[in-house]
Image (cartoon, coloured by chain):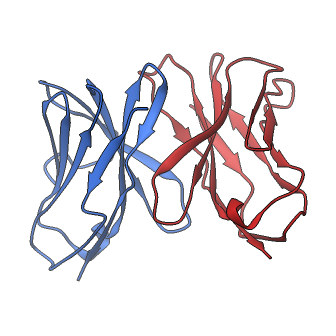
Amino acid sequence: GAVVSQHPSRVICKSGTSVKIECRSLDFQATTMFWYRQFPKQSLMLMATSNEGSKATYEQGVEKDKFLINHASLTLSTLTVTSAHPEDSSFYICSASTIHGYTFGSGTRLTVV
Amino acid sequence: GNSVTQMEGPVTLSEEAFLTINCTYTATGYPSLFWYVQYPGEGLQLLLKATKADDKGSNKGFEATYRKETTSFHLEKGSVQVSDSAVYFCALDTRSNDYKLSFGAGTTVTVRA
């Protein structure tokens, strides 16, 4: 079945630095990738939709200059959290839409100290 | 807009107990409804789905029936196992919004031997 590989699973970074999260579709081409954020004990909130070869579409309230999304190929989408701050600490998860439905990555736990 | 309201957890059960997780929704149009499961350290996996009213989704002993009259999609399992310990998410997709999923807050279920 369709598999999305997400890395890293956990990352701790210092405040002010940038962190890149990668999602790769392993056995299919992902034209569209969704990026979600999940705060503790809260739901997954859609941050943005990335489309291969074009600019990402951000949800209302999401800073596009802070959360940079690149979808340069049909098998790779990246989310870069720039100038991270402690309030950016969260669980980030990607998802691809396929003919069989949605496939999710395993998520990235980001802690900014 | 679309929203999903899910029973708050955590829920702790003994093995072979009956599990119900309530889920209600608000949506425009005719949504598809999903239950996703997230086992510890893993990504979200589709557990079951229903695409129209009165459909029943089932998988691994879990069932949920799409009830349009009560806008509900409650998840049930008659006899849980320790391996069912996970976080369960109810979600909907109206298909008219670029296939974006709207999630409930998630319910953590712990099954004790």
Q: Which of these two is toward me, B61 or A96? A: B61
How many marks do you count on the picture?
0
Q: Which of these two is toward me, A90 or A73? A: A73
- Please give the name of the residue rendered at 31% of the width and 64% of the height, measured from the top-left corner: A9
Q: Point out the image quarter for the N terminus of chain B.
A: top right
- Please give the name of the residue rendered at 37% of the width and 51% of the height, measured from the top-left corner: A93
Choose top left, top right, bottom left or bottom right for residue A57.
top left
Q: In this view, does A32 lie above or below B80?
A: above
Residue A11 image position (x, y, % from top left): 24, 71
Judge left or right: residue A102 versus residue B55.
left
Task: State the hue of chain B.
Answer: red
Residue B50 image position (x, y, % from top left): 70, 25
Choose top left, top right, bottom left or bottom right for residue A35.
top left
| Chain displayed in blue | A
Q: In this view, does B3 lie above or below B67?
A: below
Judge left or right: residue A25 versus residue B20.
left
Residue A49 image position (x, y, % from top left): 30, 34
Residue B15 image position (x, y, % from top left): 85, 68
- Please give the name of the residue rendered at 49% of the width and 27% of the height, measured from the top-left corner: A101
Q: Which of these two is toward me, A91 or B42? A: B42
Q: Point out the image quarter for the C terminus of chain B.
A: bottom right
- Please give the name of the residue rendered at 86% of the width and 24% of the height, measured from the top-left corner: B69
Choose top left, top right, bottom left or bottom right for residue B55.
top right
